[in-house]
């Protein structure tokens, strides 16, 4: 195609961390003068940013690549599945190039190879300084590190994304400040292991070192990062927090209002035997003690977690331990996954694989119990007045989220604007809650 301004199609799959990678690539493409087009037609090249974490994600990625090849024919692939180039080329030998996750420079070099960089464009100064975002204007993901130092037996993230590599605190805070100044009202802090932030640099430098930001000396650690983010005056929500002891120090920041009282802490199981097989922390009694202490310090704390049922070797007794934990912990938000064999994960080749029908039965028992717990927790909010951030406004009313709700993974709040007050997307409004079910709330303002 001959076009003075080349068009690039883009497909982004997978988790919020992958979304941040996509945003960076798109920002660089726009900075170089390419048009980003949300279709396969009339584009010079298609980029597919893939996920490769579990089998269903791999299949979705391969299907997206196939669709792009069929509709356009000129496709380059990046992302987590890109770390398995042979697997991609076995199914789709016609892809032009393949690269792994966070390979920004490689992707750009590949684009230049097939679609040369356009001439200088005088309108590039109009590119927003916060870069291109794939989220609504009022919230954004802030990725603070790449990779992971853990070797959980069900996970292949380290082989896809490498070991922990933290961004500098000044780099993270600069980006956060730009986002806040651009009108972002909520930052969602993400990484593979948020609570490990800066541990890698501390090992390399022999301890916590001082950095300088806005003319002030600051420590390069998670606690300092959270305190500084909290001073921006917007919502700050933490995701993927591994249960290290120093997580306890973050709870007072939530009680003070510097961080949202929301902790996304993937616990995975409650049986010490299964946790040991997963290579996860195994002292579940201590976890229950900490949850109790956290709620004493911050009564409004919302706890989200994820669990795996049907892990190799899981007996009915192990599963019952998990159900007993749920009853005692009374977690607010819970996700459950049936164990899925993943090529390259140690657990895939473990003995005592659990039959699919047993996984399915346990999954439903788990979800039934957690739905009862979630419904009871939400019932306690009826009659309360909550801060709600507005995500959408339609003819039926306002759809938003409370501080207890992360976008796309938690529930929502349906709001009847009885007062008729002017409301726009991104506003934070006060809502009196009148009803609830297992996941969502209803109220009026």
Image (cartoon, helix red, strand yellow):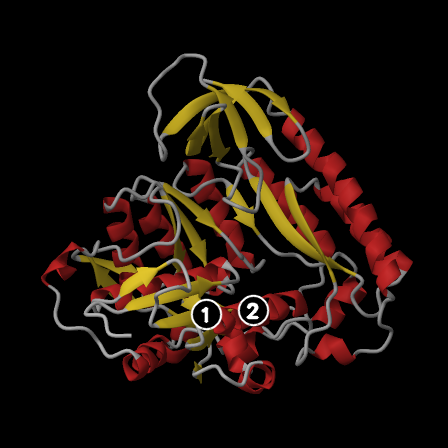
Mark seen at residue 61: 2
Query: Left or right: where does residue 303 sit relative to residue 134?
Result: right
In the figure, 143 relative to 235: above or below?
below
Q: Quadrant of the C terminus?
A: top left
In the figure, 220 relative to 106: above or below?
above
Displayed quadrant of residue 351: bottom right
Residue farthest top in this picture: 419
Secondary structure under tag 1 reads strand
Secondary structure under tag 2 reads helix
- Counting residues from the start of the chain, the first of labels 2 and 1 encountered is 1
Q: Residue at x 30, y 66 (%)?
A: 7
Q: Residue at x 50, y 63 (%)?
A: 13
The local crowd at label 2, few if under 14, some if 14 to 19, many if 20 or more residues have their Cα within 10 Å, is many
**Residue bearing mark 1:** 48
**Residues at badges 2 and 1 in contact (C-beta under 8 Å)?**
yes
Residue 158 percent across, percent down from the top left? 55, 76
Task: Pick the residue in front: 141 or 123.
Answer: 123
Residue 151 percent across, percent down from the top left? 62, 75
Q: Residue at x 52, y 60 (%)?
A: 15
Residue 189 percent across, percent down from the top left? 43, 54
Q: Residue at x 58, y 36 (%)?
A: 296
Instruction: For residue 144, say whether it is visible.
Output: no
The local crowd at label 1, few if under 14, some if 14 to 19, many if 20 or more residues have their Cα within 10 Å, is many
Mark seen at residue 74: none
Q: CA distance from mark 2 to mark 1?
A: 8 Å
Query: Left or right: where does residue 137 sit relative to residue 414?
Result: left
Task: Pick the residue in front: 332 or 356.
Answer: 356
Task: Pick the residue in front: 262 or 256.
Answer: 262
In the figure, 191 relative to 75: above or below?
above
Displayed quadrant of residue 114: bottom left
């Amino acid at each position: 195609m001959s076009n003075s301004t080349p068009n690039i199609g883009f497909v982004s799959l997978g988790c919020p961390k992958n979304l941040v990678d996509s945003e960076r690539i798109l920002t660089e493409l726009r900075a170089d003068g390419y048009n980003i087009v949300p279709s396969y037609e009339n584009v010079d090249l298609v980029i597919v940013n893939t996920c490769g974490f579990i089998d269903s994600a791999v299949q979705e990625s391969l299907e997206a690549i196939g669709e792009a090849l069929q509709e356009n024919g000129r496709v380059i692939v990046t992302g987590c599945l890109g770390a398995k180039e042979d697997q991609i080329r076995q199914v789709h030998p016609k892809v032009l190039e393949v690269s792994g996750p966070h390979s920004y420079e490689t992707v750009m070099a590949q684009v230049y190879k097939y679609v040369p960089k356009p001439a200088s464009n005088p309108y590039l100064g109009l590119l927003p300084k916060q870069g291109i975002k794939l989220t609504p204007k009022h919230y954004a993901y802030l990725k603070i590190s790449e990779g992971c130092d853990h070797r959980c037996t069900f996970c292949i993230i380290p082989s896809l994304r490498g070991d922990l590599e933290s961004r500098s605190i000044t780099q993270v805070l600069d980006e956060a400040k730009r986002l806040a100044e651009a009108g972002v009202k909520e930052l969602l802090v993400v990484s593979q292991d948020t609570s490990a932030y800066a541990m890698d640099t501390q090992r390399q430098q022999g301890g916590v070192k001082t950095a300088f930001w806005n003319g002030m000396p600051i420590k390069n650690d998670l606690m300092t990062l959270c305190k500084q983010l909290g001073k921006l005056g917007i919502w700050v929500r933490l995701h993927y927090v591994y249960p290290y002891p120093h997580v306890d120090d973050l709870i007072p920041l939530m009680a003070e209002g510097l961080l949202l009282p929301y902790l996304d802490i993937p616990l995975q199981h409650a049986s010490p035997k299964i946790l040991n097989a997963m290579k996860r922390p195994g002292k579940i009694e201590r976890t229950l003690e900490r949850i109790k202490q956290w709620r004493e310090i911050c009564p409004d704390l919302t706890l989200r977690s994820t669990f795996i049922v049907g892990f190799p070797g899981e007996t009915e007794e192990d599963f019952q331990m998990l159900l007993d934990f749920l009853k005692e912990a009374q977690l607010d938000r819970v996700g459950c996954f049936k164990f899925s064999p993943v090529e390259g994960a140690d657990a895939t080749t473990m003995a005592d694989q659990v039959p699919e029908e047993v996984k399915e039965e346990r999954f439903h028992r788990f979800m039934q119990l957690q739905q009862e717990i979630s419904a009871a927790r939400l019932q306690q909010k009826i009659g309360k007045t909550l801060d709600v951030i507005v995500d959408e406004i339609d003819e039926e009313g306002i759809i938003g989220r409370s501080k207890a709700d992360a976008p796309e993974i938690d529930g929502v709040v349906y709001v009847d604007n009885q007062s008729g007050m002017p409301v726009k997307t991104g506003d934070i409004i006060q809502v009196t809650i009148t009803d609830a079910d297992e996941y969502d709330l209803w109220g009026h303002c």
